[in-house]
Amino acid sequence: MKKIIGLLVTAFFVLGLMSTNAMADASKGQKYYLKYMKNDSGMNGAKFATQHTQAEWKALFAGKGEKFIAEYSAKIPGLKAFLEGDKFAKFMPDIRDFCVEYASDSGNVPSC
């Protein structure tokens, strides 16, 4: 009985560690984009998200999003402070999911 309980506790612990990125949400990412990035970028969410394919967005956001930060800090200087700040680090998984969900090859169109 102790082995089963120990195995279950371990499984839930591992699942909890792995689900951090799985809990990201495209609709939250859309809200964060609208609140923190839309004004400085001058683009609505649909235009922004369709700048890349799903694979390209995933590559840009790989790791801690260094490539995304570098590309969009250069393209849109007004976003640099946000992209290098703590809020972006916190919201990045959701913004990533938003970009991937509505990428140019996804066939989806956001309502913003």
Image: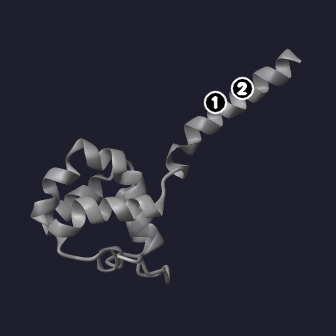
Residue placed under numbered mark 2 in the picture? 9
Could you tell me residue 77's position as x and y percent? 10, 63
Residue name at image x 39 percent, y 60 percent? 29
Residue 87 place in picture, x, y as percent = 27, 46
Amino acid type, mark 2? Val
Q: Is residue 3 left or right of residue 101?
A: right
Say left or right for 21 vs 34.
Answer: right
- The residue positioned 64% from the left and 38% from the top of the image is 15
> Measured along the vertical axis of the image, is residue 82 above or below residue 78?
above
**Residue shown at 11% from the left, 62% from the top:** 78
Which image quarter holds the N terminus?
A: top right
Closest to the observer: 106 or 60?
106
Label 2 CA crowd tier, 10 Å (few <14, some 14–19, many 20+): few
Q: Give the quarter of the figure containing the C terminus.
A: bottom left
* Residue 65 x/y as whole percent: 32, 53
Q: Which residue is mark 1?
A: 13
